[in-house]
Image (cartoon, rainbow, N blue to C red):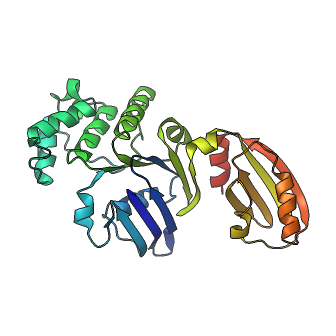
Amino acid sequence: MSIKVSSVSKVYGSQIAVNDISFEAKNGEIIGFLGPNGAGKSTMMKILTGFLKPDSGEVFVNYIDVLKNPIKAQKTIGYLPENNALYKDMYVREYLHFCASVFKLSMLNNLTVKEQIEICIKKVGLQSESHKKIHQLSKGYQQRVGIAAAILHNPTVLILDEPTTGLDPNQLAEIRTLIKELGKEKTVLFSTHIMQEVEAVCDRVIIVKKGEILVNELLKNLQKNSLQIIEVVFDLNVAKEIINQIPNVISAKKSENQWQITFDTQKDMRSKIFDFAQENNLKILELSSKNKNLETFFREVTVN
């Protein structure tokens, strides 16, 4: 298991940034950490990389306790922060050599630092631009420089915070392709607020809102069928944990006394709702069903 997060919370004054989050990432998995602005995505990225301590919970990367051994964990993590801070008056190779010296890189797999830098330049597609100063590069190529710096030490886990922000459509496509290529040999976790980014790149999607996980599911399970949403009102209060026991439920949220339950199947689940009500001695006061695509699903589960 490359990443394991257990019951992590972080509070700033009265603002809950991360609320009891738990999830795991397998080796070689590309995960999209998807949520609207202010959902707690960047806070979680900083906690995962050891740059921010949570108020509670545990974080392990490559079986290393990030809270107890942040430096050791960081040696196995590549990190591109949301604001990709680059020394823009430096040439590309000059900057990467500077990063290598900061990281105190030495021989790695019988490769010199210079050889490692050339491999990273090639891997992220910077060969044609590597002779330029960073300020001369487009936003897309500047992001590539940041990613090259993040993988210099050959990490097994790569964490990218909003890596496609501000890119034009062509640059978006190129960075998506790069992330998919890197995902063939690394575990990649990247945050975004755009569902299309997740659909184009990821194996798994984690949807967050107000610091809480709403959905944690394989993308193929969401894509293989149109999503079915059932809105139901019971005569009595029902705990979310009980609702989640209904087959094929991927999310459930309550507004006043109405439940909105999302299923990852085309099969009409209304009969299952009736069975559930009968088994739990509930009466159904209202019931409606509709199908949604992924974009609409994301909008519905994250809307206020």
Toward the top, the furthest residue is: 128
Please say if 280 is above or below 131: below
Tell me where residue 25 sits by quadrant: bottom left
Question: Residue at point 37% right, 48% down?
Answer: 187
Position of residue 184 measured from the top left corner of the image (x, y, whole percent): 37, 39
On screen, residue 35 versus residue 162, left or right, reads: right
Tell me where residue 245 sits by quadrant: bottom right
Q: Which of 254 and 140 is in front in this view?
A: 254
Question: Residue at point 68% right, 69% down?
Answer: 241
Position of residue 301 measured from the top left corner of the image (x, y, whole percent): 65, 53
Please say if 135 is above or below 53: above
Question: Residue at point 46% right, 48% down?
Answer: 31
Kindly tell me whether residue 90 is visible in this rendering: no
Kindly tell me whether residue 242 is visible in this rendering: yes
Position of residue 33 measured from the top left corner of the image (x, y, whole percent): 48, 51
Question: Residue at point 73% right, 72% down?
Answer: 239
Q: In which quarter of the image is the N terminus?
A: bottom left
Position of residue 76 measured from the top left corner of the image (x, y, whole percent): 26, 55
On screen, residue 125 versus residue 180, left or right, reads: left
Q: In which quarter of the image is the C terminus?
A: bottom right
On screen, residue 146 versus residue 289, left or right, reads: left
Please say if 185 is above or below 169: below
On screen, residue 138 versus residue 240, left or right, reads: left
Tell me where residue 284 sits by quadrant: bottom right
